[in-house]
Image (spheres, coloured by chain):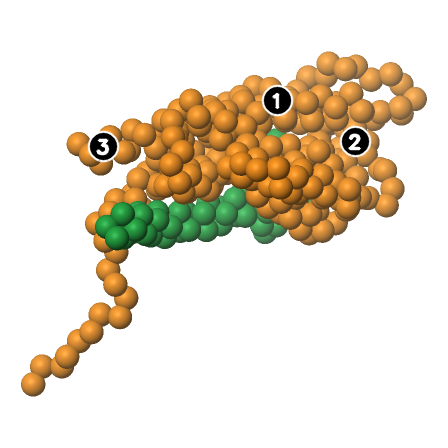
Amino acid sequence: MTPHMTCVTQPASPATKQMFSRVLTSALFAGAAAGLLIALLQLLFVQPVLLHAELYESGELVHFGGEAVTAHPDLPGFDAVRDGLSIVFTMLTYTGYALVMVALMSIAEGMGHAVTARTGILWGLAGFVTFHLAPGFTLAPEVPGVAAADVVDRQIWWTATVAAAGIAMWLLAFGGNLVSYAIAAMLLMLPHLIGAPEPETFTGPVPTEIGALFAARAFGIGLAAWALLGCFAGHFWQAEAKQAEA
Amino acid sequence: MTTKTLTKSAAGTRFMPALFAVILGLGVITLTGHVQASALHDAAHDVRHATGFPCH
C-alpha cells in the first residue's frame, strides 16, 4: 500500500513566481547600478571631507591649538582596499534600499498607480526623505570624531524615525485625504519634537567648517543618489515586465 | 464575481514577493548600516558616515 501524501503548503502560482523574479531582478539591477554611480560620487565629493576630518580626529592637525592650521592639507589619495570596500558596501546598501522600494512599487502598481522611470524620481525623493533627510534632520550626518550619544540609542531613534517618515511619505503620496496628510505631518515632526539622543558634552576636535561641509555634501550626494535609484528602479521595473511578456 | 476573484488573486500575487523583498532589503540595510561587529564596522565605516547612519 502506498502512503497517501498531502501537500500542506500550496505551491506558488506561476504568476507569483514571475512577480518574485521581477521584484528581485529589477531591485538588484537598480541597486547595483545606482550604487556604483553613488559610490563614485561619494569618493569624489564626500571622501575628501571625511579624510580631512580624520586628520583632526587622529590629532595630526589641532584646531585652535595655538597655531593657525592650513585649510588645505595634503590628503591621502585613493586607497584600493578601503575605497574598494566602500564601493561594495555602497552598492549593497543601495540594493537593500532598492529591494524595499521596488516591493512598495509593486504594491502601488497593484493599486493602479503607474510606475515608470519618471515617476521613479518621485519615489527616489520620498526614499531620500525617509532614509536620509528625516533622521539627518536631527542626527545630522557625522564627520568622524564628533561627540555623540550611545550608538545603540541613536540606532533605535534612527530606525523609529525612518519608519515614521516612511509611513508619512506613503500617506502623502497615496492617502488622498486631509486626515492622512495631517497624520503624515505629525509623523514627520514627532521624532524631532521628542528629540534624538544627544551627547552629554561637546568634544569634537573637527573645525565647524569641515563638519558643515560634510553634512551639506552627504545630503547633496544622498539626494542625487536617491533620484538615480528611484529612476533606475522604475526603469528596470518596466523593463522586467516587458521581458516577462516577451 | 469574476472581477472579485481576479482582484484578490492579483493582490495575492504581489503580496508575498513584496513582503519577502522588504524583509531581505531591511536585512541588508541592517547589515551594512547598523551591525557593530568590528570587521563590518571598519569595512562599512566611510559609507555609514556618508549615508547618514549612526556610526560609532
Left or right for A11, reference B14: left
Q: Residue at x 25, y 56 (%)?
A: A12
In the image, B30 versus A230, the foreground residue is A230
Using the image, name the chain to which the residue with label 2 belongs: A
Instruction: Specify few, some or many for label 2: CA neighbours under 10 Å numbering under 14, 14-19, or 20 or more.
Output: few
Label whose residue precedes the other's in the sequence (1 or 3): 1
Question: Which amino acid does the dot numbered 1 rest on?
Answer: Gly
Q: Tag on residue A220?
A: 1
Do marks 3 and 2 share a chain?
A: yes
Does the residue at mark 1 contact the one at mark 2 (Cβ under 8 Å)?
A: no
Q: Is any atom of residue A162 visible in this view? A: no
| Secondary structure under the numbered disc 3 in the rendered image | helix
Q: CA distance from mark 1 to mark 2?
A: 28 Å
Q: In the displayed structure, does residue A5 sit left or right of residue B49?
A: left
Reading the image, the residue beneath label 2 is: A59
- The N terminus of chain A - image quarter: bottom left
**Residue at the image point whose x is 30% and y is 44% from the top:** A19
Q: Which residue is mark 3?
A: A243
Marks 3, 2: nearer the viewer: 3
Secondary structure beneath label 1: helix
Q: Which chain is green?
A: B
Chain ID of residue with mark 1? A
Circle nearer the viewer, 1 or 2: 1
Image quadrant occupied by the C terminus of chain A: top left
Q: Amino acid at mark 3?
A: Gln
Q: Earlier in the sequence, mark 3 or mark 2?
A: 2
Q: Is residue B14 above or below residue A50?
A: below
The chain whose colour is orange is A
Q: Circle 2 sits in a helix, a strand or a loop, which is it?
A: loop
Mark pair 3, 2: CA separation: 56 Å
Dot 3 crowding, Cα within 10 Å, few <14, some 14–19, many 20+: few
